[in-house]
Image (spheres, rainbow, N blue to C red):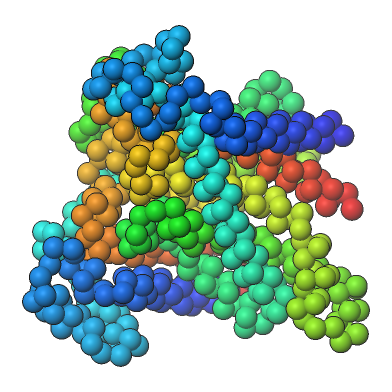
Amino acid sequence: MSGDGRERRLALLGAVMVLALVAVALCAPWLAPFDPLKAVADSFGNPFAPQARHLLGTDELGRDVLSRLIYGARISLLVGVVATGLTVVIGVTVGVSAGYFGGWVDTLLMRVTDVVLSFPLLLLAIALAALFEPGLKSIFVVIAVVSWTGVARTVRGDVLSVRGRDFVQAVHALGAHPLRIVLRHVLPNVWPTILIMAVLSTSSTVLLDAGLSYLGLGVPVPTPSWGRMLSDSQTYYRIAPWLMVFPGLAIVYTVVAFNFLGYGLLARSERRGRSR
Amino acid sequence: MSALLRRLGWSVVILFGVTLLTFVIAFIVPSDPARTLAGPKADRETIASIRHELGLDQPVPLQYVRYLGRLARGDLGRSYLTRQGVLDAIVERLPATAFLAIVSLALAAVAGVGLGCASALRQGSALDMTVLAGSLVALSVPTFWIGMLLLYVFAYRLGWFPLGGIGLVNVVLPAGALALGNAASYARLLHTNLRSVLGEDYIRTAHAKGLSAARVYGKHALRNALIPLVTLLGLDLAGLMSGVVLTETVFNWPGLGRLAVEAVFNQDIPMIMGTVLFSAVLVVAANIVVDFLYVAIDPRIRSARQ
């Protein structure tokens, strides 16, 4: 039971961290001390170190780092939520179809999953990003296209086990339409898994987005994004190391928050599954 | 053995899927592949010649067959920037990446197995909690950010390692940055495996026989707990290739990842698709090797499959 308490604490801590981040992103205009896009200090080419007026310093263009970080949370969460939403929709569609229909549909869909899994995630993502117009929409699509496989595999497994249960066999015997069986009887039993997978995918989405932004394939400038701030900081790392410290911490905080929440929920549901 | 052959057959199917997906991305997704391949600065003549060269006026299925034919001859196309053969460029860059990846995997294995064992044997201790929480945090840190921090602290501030360059000393920092995530996942997995193995009857029997603790843990427990780690290797290679893209960019390491990123910046589509295809094929090949390894090291599977 002590293990269960540990997992609940982990999930709770993650939830609080996520909520705090969401609050910061929503309240960005009131929280940010300066305009994130404008030069507010005379620090062109010579970033200011953290000080009373600029708590996290300024960048090489005289912009306030704290304000840019706060607004960066919006982009990070937006990409996290929308790209993960798309990822989950694709993954659940593939996973439910494969698990419910079985047979050749299952074989085909799972081989397609294997094919996509054979590609290094980031390499496939940058190849796709190179072909699409740069912008938010492309990022959503690119991330979803490369990362639905994990959700699909897990959901398929769950659907397989639900499908074999008596009540599903019963509604099937009553002649219910497959779509109705899936929506009314199978999906509600898979929801917990989907929710956990969505939370865990969000953390990998945020990491992937940070990597893409770092490589210059994220949201176009001047929109503040943490990954881009990190790649920009490299020119000035000798004289202004704080420029690379804070955006990195922001990314780690976000990913840790979703991972704590996700793994906490996952461990709890696995424990419950065992004791059932 | 037949199960192994069936898996081998599926690998071939997946290999075809990999080429099909690459083909679709390179030739079907762009509205005018010839223009995309030629780059934004190409004139009409160049585009027309590329169209002819690639047979883009022919039916798509035929184009795919011809694409497969070119691949079979090792022809991955030419860079539109340097005109160098894509496969030549890849072969040229491969050793640097292989070097980095192998050192990184070795570091990850040593650190992950060490920490995983230590935390599993001291369940509930401070070390156990630190390793579990630490591994979760380590999995959340962007590889490239760790690389930047290592570079700043150990190369720039302390001067222990050279900035850039390739060699035995130079590889330590990038390999370390790249190893962090894998070390964390190995530690977590080994912890779980070892806990379950330690509860098995044969471990109690080994203890009861009066074997030394070192022998029980080393010979009986660890061996069985390590086996599932081997299956991870194939997928790890895919993860490693992703990590390599970022790590090589941070450390300016002249490998495949850097090649792919440079190709993206130059909109050098044949080079991008070539590196993507090459690394996917590498992953499929690694999975085949893992299947054989798995059977070779675990006698239970061998007998179960016969």
Q: How many marks?
A: 0
Expressed as whole percent of the image width and height from the top left, the position of residue B188 reads 62, 39
Residue that extends furthest to the top in the rendered view of this protein: A52
Q: Answer with left or right where residue B200 lies relative to residue B135.
A: right
Q: Is residue B71 visible?
A: no
Q: Nearer the viewer, residue A271 or B224?
A: A271
Give above or below for B266 relative to B144: below
Residue A213 appears anywhere in the view: yes
Q: x, y percentage for residue A78?
A: 54, 46
Image height check: is B28 above or below A264?
A: below
Q: Position of residue A175 (x, y in %)?
A: 86, 87
User: Residue at (43%, 38%) from the top-left corner?
Assistant: A225
* Picture residue at 32% right of the left edge, 83% below the top: B64
Name the quarter where the N terminus of chain A is drawn: top right
Q: Nearer the viewer, residue B183 or B257?
A: B257
Residue at 63% across / 40% down in the picture? A258
Location of residue A222 in the rendering, given as x and y in whole percent from the top left corner: 35, 39
**Does B90 sit left or right of B183 as displayed?**
left
Against A275, residue A70 (above or below) is above
Residue ID at (45%, 63%): A118
Q: Specify whether A70 is left or right of A227.
A: right
Residue A138 appears in which quarter of the rendering? bottom left
Residue A126, quarter of the rendered image? bottom left
